Amino acid sequence: GENVEQHPSTLSVQEGDSAVIKCTYSDSASNYFPWYKQELGKRPQLIIDIRSNVGEKKDQRIAVTLNKTAKHFSLHITETQPEDSAVYFCAGTNNNDMRFGAGTRLTVKP
Amino acid sequence: EAGVAQSPRYKIIEKRQSVAFWCNPISGHATLYWYQQILGQGPKLLIQFQNNGVVDDSQLPKDRFSAERLKGVDSTLKIQPAKLEDSAVYLCASSLRQYNSPLHFGNGTRLTVT
């Protein structure tokens, strides 16, 4: 089955800086890669997703890039704000079950 | 639209006791998932249903965990008997399609086994 690895496990940035979180996946057949944000004590919520027929997708300050050859995808957050502080999870699916990375705790310092 | 509903929100039990969690997915979502999220880790899939059929239960500890989705809507996850290592948040999620579709999560049930 699919195996998703995520790094770094923790990331601290200054408000206004950019943050980048990277994930690698094992199954070359994987074709859908969502990113979830989980605030403390709350449910994971989808923030952006990308399909394997697209190399990049942007939504305001958030972007995701996908490199199918290298089997990795990344989340980019620009102009970070304190409310971006949360745990971020990447996931991948190969038309089967969805596997999650271990998460990245992002702290944005004011 | 109404989100995924889960209950209870919190549960504390002693080891070897049994516990059950309930989930009501978003209306029209045929696919339902149960995930286990241990503190500091990513969600781990326990079981996936498509309507009332099991798609994947390869990571479900079947000696103690069971789940059902009668009538293809609500689902129940049961643990019997519970162990200390079962302490976690149990998240239910649903999606519109079986494949390549965003998951919508409930608020989860935080289980503490003492």
Image (cartoon, coloured by chain):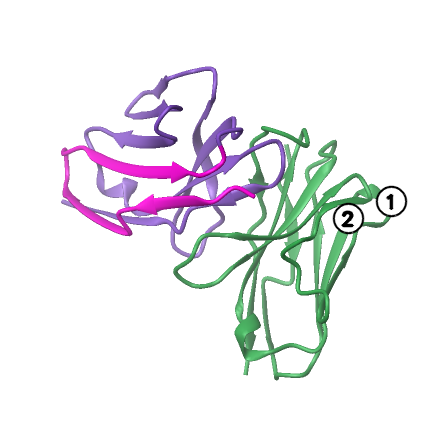
Chain colours: A purple, B green
For mark 2, name the chain.
Answer: B
- Residue A102: image x %, image y %? 40, 51
Of A14 and A83, nearer the camera is A14
* Residue beneath the point at 58% across and 39% down: B104
Q: Residues within 10 Å of mark 1 (few under 14, many from 20)?
A: few
As drawn, A83 above or below B79: above
In the rendered image, which quarter contains the N terminus of chain B?
Answer: top right
What residue is disc 1 on?
B71
Left or right of residue A16, residue B36 in this image: right
User: Can residue B69 be seen by looking at this rendering?
Assistant: yes
Q: Is residue A5 highlighted in magenta?
A: yes
Residues drawn in magenta: A1-27
Q: Tag on residue B19?
A: none
For mark 1, name the chain.
Answer: B
Q: Name the kind of residue labelled 2 in the image.
A: Asp
* Circles 2 and 1 in contact, beta carbons < 8 Å: yes
Q: Name the kind of residue labelled 1 in the image.
A: Lys
- Residue A108: image x %, image y %? 20, 45
Q: Residues within 10 Å of mark 2 (few under 14, many from 20)?
A: some
User: Can residue A88 be seen by looking at this rendering?
Assistant: no
What residue is disc 2 on?
B74
For the residue labelled by badge 2, is the local secondary structure a helix, a strand or a loop? loop
